[in-house]
Amino acid sequence: MNEEKSNVENKKNEDIQEEQNTEHTENSENQEDQNETKQEVEEKQESKESEEDIRGSEEDLKSRLKETEEKMEEVITENEKLNDKFTRLAAEFKNYKKRTRKEEQERLKYEGKNILKELLPVFDDIDRAVEHQENSAKKDSEESSKQDSDNGGLQMIHKKLHNVLNNLEVEKYDSVGEEFDPDLHHAIMTKESEEHDSDIVLEEIEKGYMYKDKVLRYARVIVSK
């Protein structure tokens, strides 16, 4: 009887042990399942985070690309403005050089104009003196001989002065009988004339002079009306 009791207890212990082993096995399997599930969840989470990172990187890349394109457009626009400004400045500087060169050539070409203009009254006086001597009557042979000598000296001076003027490209121009030209003549008065049409120069009070291709002094004239 004791043996039977012992067998029963052994059997009971075996059943308990088997049950515990089964439970342990199930727990192990459950733990493995849980571990696998956890790993799958972690992998999915990592995959999701990776996808989000990729999307974030793509969006960030697109945003940076857009900013770069906008900056490039700004740089291109600014470059075009600078090119236009440079082109205008270059054209203005070129025109300035042309203008200053022309002004300098003009200045050199007509250098001495003011001095020559101041000397014209002296030339007028000499012209009048020569004209007066040529038209004066001879009183007697002795006086005539002396006068001829004086006339010769004055005429020589007169000729030399006009040669100097010609060499300097200063020339008289005739006005009597010509049509009045405001670019050449200065009318000091008008006079009735049956022999001439209106605006014709009748008399020349003061000779006009040209210096190269410009008027040095306007002729002072009387014009018909």
Image (cartoon, rainbow, N blue to C red):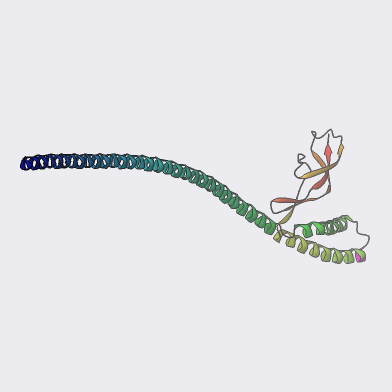
Q: Where is residue 108 in the image (x, y as percent from the top left)?
A: 68, 59
In the rendered image, the quadrant that contains the C terminus is top right
Location of residue 55 with respect to 82 vertically, above or below: above
Q: How many marks?
A: 0
- Toward the viewer: 177 or 170? 170
**Range of the magenta residues?**
138-142
Identify the residue at horizontal 65%, vertical 57% (top origin): 105
- The majority secondary structure of the magenta stretch comes to loop
Camera-nearest residue between 154 and 92: 92
Q: Quadrant of residue 55?
A: top left
Q: Which residue extends farthest right? A: 139
Coordinates of residue 168 in the picture (x, y in percent): 71, 60
Residue at (44, 45) in percent of width and height: 68
- Residue 139 in magenta? yes
Pick the residue in front: 99 or 71. 71
Coordinates of residue 180 in the picture (x, y in percent): 77, 39
